[in-house]
């Protein structure tokens, strides 16, 4: 199993390896931010719409891959809001327009649950949900 994971890591492109390590660092940063400095954790401005433009779909796909891979292996909490903030940081770093959605829905037991997901270039980067299931509360960009 470990040999297979090592081979897969070696076969990844340089950009994906770089994004994996960069996202690992950002993941720990967002964990600390939400744990100790919640007021400084900001998704961006509320209510702005995306300006249409050219986006690098391969880069967005690599960012999505890195966030999913890091989420699989980090030992600290890395829930949807952490991942959305990671996507924001990476999208800002690469100058990619993004949107972060925060929504709510009632689960089977009748309790309200919240969720955050991010989208860039028409691709869902984090959250991996059916947005139609949620009542969108806020959109950040």
Image (tube, rainbow, N blue to C red):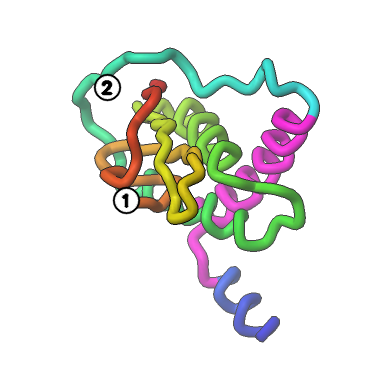
Judge by depth and name the residue closer to the eye, 113 or 25.
113
Q: Which mark is residue 130?
A: 1
Kindly report the distance in space between the C-alpha atoms of the residues bearing marks 1 and 2: 20 Å
Q: Sort mark 1 into few (<14), some (14-19) or many (20+) by Cα contacts within 10 Å.
A: few
Q: Quadrant of the C terminus?
A: top left
The answer to if 52 sits in the magenta stretch is: no
Q: Position of residue 16 (x, y in %)?
A: 51, 55
Tell me the quarter of the image containing the N terminus. bottom right
N-term-proximal mark, 1 vs 2: 2
Mark in the foreground, 1 or 2: 1
The total of numbered circles placed on residues is 2
Seen from the viewer's position, the closer of residues 77 and 89 is: 77
Task: Kindly indicate the quadrant of the structure image that contains residue 137.
Answer: top left
Q: Is residue 29 left or right of residue 118?
A: right
Q: Which residues are magenta?
A: 11-35
Furthest-left residue in this view = 52
Left or right: 85 with respect to 104?
Answer: right
Q: Residue furthest front?
A: 110
Secondary element under disc 1, as helix, strand or loop, is loop
* Residue 123 % position (x, y): 30, 45
For residue 73, which quarter of the picture? bottom right
Q: Which mark is residue 50?
A: 2
Q: Residue at x 59, y 49 (%)?
A: 18
Q: Is residue 81 left or right of residue 57?
A: right
Residue at the image position 39 percent from the left and 31 percent from the top: 101
Residue at 47% from the left image edge and 38% from the top image edge: 116
- Circle 2 packing at 10 Å, graded few (<14), some (14-19), many (20+), is few
Give the secondary structure at mark 2.
loop
Q: Residue at x 52, y 71 (%)?
A: 11
């Amino acid at each position: 199993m470990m040999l297979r994971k090592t081979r897969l890591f070696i076969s990844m492109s340089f950009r994906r390896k770089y994004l994996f390590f960069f996202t690992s660092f950002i993941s720990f940063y967002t964990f600390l931010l939400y744990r100790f400095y919640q007021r400084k954790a900001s998704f961006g401005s509320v209510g702005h719409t995306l300006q249409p433009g050219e986006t690098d779909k391969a880069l967005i796909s690599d960012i999505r891959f890195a966030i999913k891979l890091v989420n699989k292996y980090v030992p600290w909490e890395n829930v949807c809001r952490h991942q959305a903030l990671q996507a924001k940081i990476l999208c800002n770093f690469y100058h990619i327009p993004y949107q972060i959605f925060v929504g709510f829905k009632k689960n089977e037991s009748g309790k309200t649950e919240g969720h955050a997901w991010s989208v860039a270039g028409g691709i869902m980067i984090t959250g991996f949900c059916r947005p139609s299931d949620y009542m969108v509360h806020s959109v950040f960009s």
